[in-house]
Amino acid sequence: GAVVSQHPSWVICKSGTSVKIECRSLDFQATTMFWYRQFPKQSLMLMATSNEGSKATYEQGVEKDKFLINHASLTLSTLTVTSAHPEDSSFYICSADRGITEAFFGQGTRLTVV
Amino acid sequence: RKEVEQDPGPFNVPEGATVAFNCTYSNSASQSFFWYRQDCRKEPKLLMSVYSSGNEDGRFTAQLNRASQYISLLIRDSKLSDSATYLCVVNFKGTGNQFYFGTGTSLTVIP
């Protein structure tokens, strides 16, 4: 069964609004979670590394004020896309670090900004 | 320079064919290697890990060449259900357990 749950699986929002995506580790504690973005026909690109109890580490070119990450507990990280615009429409996927090499992914969130 | 380079394809092959995908990675300190499968609009799922000694799982064979920083995946006797995008993934334990993805290779198996 799934070990990482991501919600919602899809969302449509108006331009200028904010959208929150949740990523939960189901049967383990994850001090580190990762957020990826995937545009059509492109690979997953790491956006940021979310660390429980501390600030997230953002990859170069990712605006930290636009993509707010909160990792307040060992089982939950949230990504908030603030003031979303059509160019933010993408497939967002989280993964949780279980301390082993295999990556466990959430089901992904398809965001469409209209 | 990308961490992981992959031929995006697409590969369109008939049922029963053998198809091979290749991938190169740039960081010689990379520690673990994988092939993931991603179906359209779904999250990636682990297909198999890749070891220097080579490993086989049914119709799938993966190989790693550390000297050349090269990873391969061979699919024999292709099935329609093999149609998907195959992602080459490299793991590096730097400041965290980070994974780097290739662009993916699209495979369509044709009846």
Image (cartoon, helix red, strand yellow):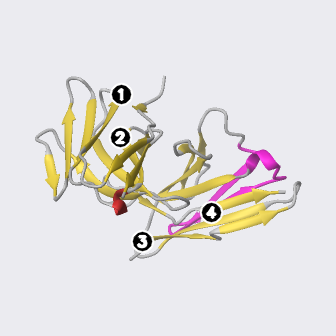
Residue B56 percent across, percent down from the top left: 15, 52
- The answer to whether the residue labelled 3 contacts the one labelled 2, judged by CB atoms less than 8 Å apart, is no
Between disc 4 and disc 3, the foreground one is: 4
- The answer to whether the residue labelled 2 contacts the one labelled 1, judged by CB atoms less than 8 Å apart, is yes
Three-letter amino acid code of the residue under disc 2: Val
Q: Secondary structure at mark 1?
A: loop
Q: Secondary structure at mark 4?
A: strand
Q: Are marks 4 and 1 on the same chain?
A: no
- Is residue A68 shown above or below A104? above
Disc 4 from disc 1: Cα separation: 30 Å
Q: What residue is shown with label 2?
A: B90
Residue B94 percent across, percent down from the top left: 39, 38
- The answer to whether the residue labelled 4 contacts the one labelled 1, judged by CB atoms less than 8 Å apart, is no
Q: Relative to the observer, which residue lies in front, A24 or B20? A: B20
Chain at numbered mark 4: A
Asked if residue A99 shows in the view, the reply is no
Disc 4 from disc 3: Cα separation: 16 Å
Q: Are marks 2 and 4 on the same chain?
A: no
Q: Which residues are magenta?
A: A64-88
Q: Secondary structure at mark 2?
A: strand
Q: Residue at x 37, y 43 (%)?
A: B89
Disc 2 from disc 4: Cα separation: 23 Å
Tell which residue pokes out farthest to the left in this image: B53
Residue A12 percent across, percent down from the top left: 77, 65
Q: What residue is shown with label 3?
A: A3
Circle 3 residues within 10 Å: few <14, some 14–19, many ≥20: some
